[in-house]
Image (cartoon, coloured by chain):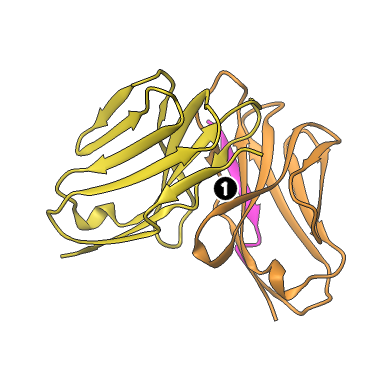
Chain colours: A orange, B yellow
Amino acid sequence: SQTIHQWPATLVQPVGSPLSLECTVEGTSNPNLYWYRQAAGRGLQLLFYSVGIGQISSEVPQNLSASRPQDRQFILSSKKLLLSDSGFYLCAWFPDLGYNEQFFGPGTRLTVL
Amino acid sequence: GQQVMQIPQYQHVQEGEDFTTYCNSSTTLSNIQWYKQRPGGHPVFLIQLVKSGEVKKQKRLTFQFGEAKKNSSLHITATQTTDVGTYFCAGRGGSNYKLTFGKGTLLTVNP
């Protein structure tokens, strides 16, 4: 069966520090991968998605970047965190276009101080 | 770009009362999905609607997709404390790769 992992679960970082969040998927190949941010425990904002290795689509210009160095690995990064980067970061995947649902990882709760 | 509006933002009910959340898209959707997020958790898929006018039921939950495929609703009959959480709709329009999520409705239930 397929499993999606995210780490760390929680993170507290100072303003101006770098960020690296990792997401990996097991039990499938060539998944479509997504990064969402949920601020203040509410709506889901799509940040990036990837349909293959090295392919990144950015939805919202901001202080973040994404990379997909391997088929089942998706990384969210920042060189210098802002206070507004605080939130709940969720990785998700679609098996392929024929499947119905997106599967979400457990999320990383980031607090920037 | 495509926008999905969801109302209400919050709903507090007494256990046993009914609950409804509504979604409206700025564009025609190919399908719409519903997710539930428990407090502190991640969104979990509930259902997908594809056909115009489609109605699906899951026990006390009833999902509807509008005739024009631009709006949808989720109705819960006789709410229970286990129904607590945020309910999101998510629509797929022109791009097969992306879902556009509504802002969600946070449901709280008083026992």
Q: Is residue A20 left or right of residue B71?
A: right
**Residue at figure coordinates x 68%, y 30% from the top left:** A31
- The percent position of residue B3, horizontal first and vertical second, equals 57, 42
Q: Is residue A93 left or right of residue A47?
A: left
Q: Is residue B99 left or right of residue B10?
A: right
In the depicted view, which residue is nearer to us: A102 or A38?
A: A38
**Quadrant placement of the N terminus of chain B:** top right
Magenta span has B61? no
In the depicted view, which residue is nearer to us: B76 or A25?
A: B76
- The percent position of residue A54, horizontal first and vertical second, equals 86, 35
Chain of the residue on which disc 1 is drawn: A
Q: Amino acid at mark 1?
A: Gly
- The percent position of residue A22, horizontal first and vertical second, equals 72, 52
Judge whether A14 appears above or below B84 on screen: below
Q: Which residues are magenta?
A: A1-10
**Residue at figure coordinates x 37%, y 55% from the top left:** B8
Magenta residues, dominant SS class: strand
**Quadrant placement of the C terminus of chain B:** bottom left
